[in-house]
Amino acid sequence: MTEDTKKKSQKEEKPLDKMTVKELKEIAMAIPHDHTEIAVSDMKKDQLLSFIKEAQGISDEKPEKKVKKTAEKIPLSKGEIKAKIKDLQKEKQAVRNQNDEKLVRALRRRISRLKKMSRKIA
């Protein structure tokens, strides 16, 4: 294979979004259009992408994002938060006696978050 055919095959394999502006301009110059040289030289990457996709008939639709269904959070009162903190502290002490450092760190973070929440409610 010659170097030209290698370059062309690499460009075709690479998705348009991953190409550089220089590569996109080369592709856009090959597309027949009025005043292509003037328009392409002034285009930015997003404009080049939309121009090439439009010329090649590629749809630019993005897949819909999946929305997670979560239960509504019921705000806790300050007393409920403090009670939860005390329970977690007891649990943390029990886990610490079992030498499970990973769970101790997780409980410490949960306690810290609850303390922050209690300060915000004040």
Image (cartoon, rainbow, N blue to C red):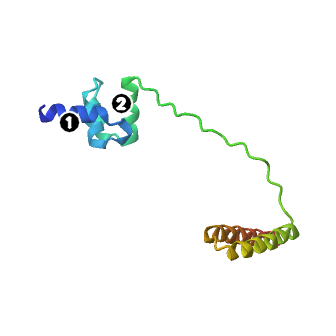
Q: Which residue does the numbered mark 1 point to in the structure image?
A: 7
Quarter that holds the C terminus: bottom right
Query: Which residue is at 69% across, 68% downward?
Result: 107
Q: Quadrant of residue 28?
A: top left
Seen in the image, is 56 located left or right of residue 1? right
Element marked by disc 1: helix
Q: How many marks?
A: 2
Q: Position of residue 4 (x, y in %)?
A: 15, 33
Element marked by disc 2: helix
Q: Quadrant of residue 93?
A: bottom right
Q: CA distance from mark 1 to mark 2?
A: 19 Å
Q: Which residue does the numbered mark 2 point to in the structure image?
A: 52
Q: Position of residue 79 (x, y in %)?
A: 88, 70
Q: Position of residue 23 (x, y in %)?
A: 27, 39
Quarter that holds the N terminus: top left
Tag 2: residue type?
A: Ile
Query: Which residue is at 81% across, 70% downward?
Result: 87
Dot 2, how many residues are within 10 Å of its Cα: few (below 14), some (14-19), or many (20+)?
A: some
Seen in the image, is 75 located left or right of residue 51? right
Query: Which residue is at 79% across, 49% downward?
Result: 72
Q: Is residue 115 above or below residue 70?
A: below
Dot 1 or dot 2: first in sequence order is 1
Mark linked to residue 43:
none
Seen in the image, is 86 located left or right of residue 4? right
Query: Could you tell me if residue 44 is visible in this image?
Result: no
Q: Quadrant of residue 27?
A: top left
Tag 1: residue type?
A: Lys
Asked if labels 2 and 1 touch by Cβ distance under 8 angstroms, the answer is no
Q: Is residue 79 above or below residue 28?
A: below
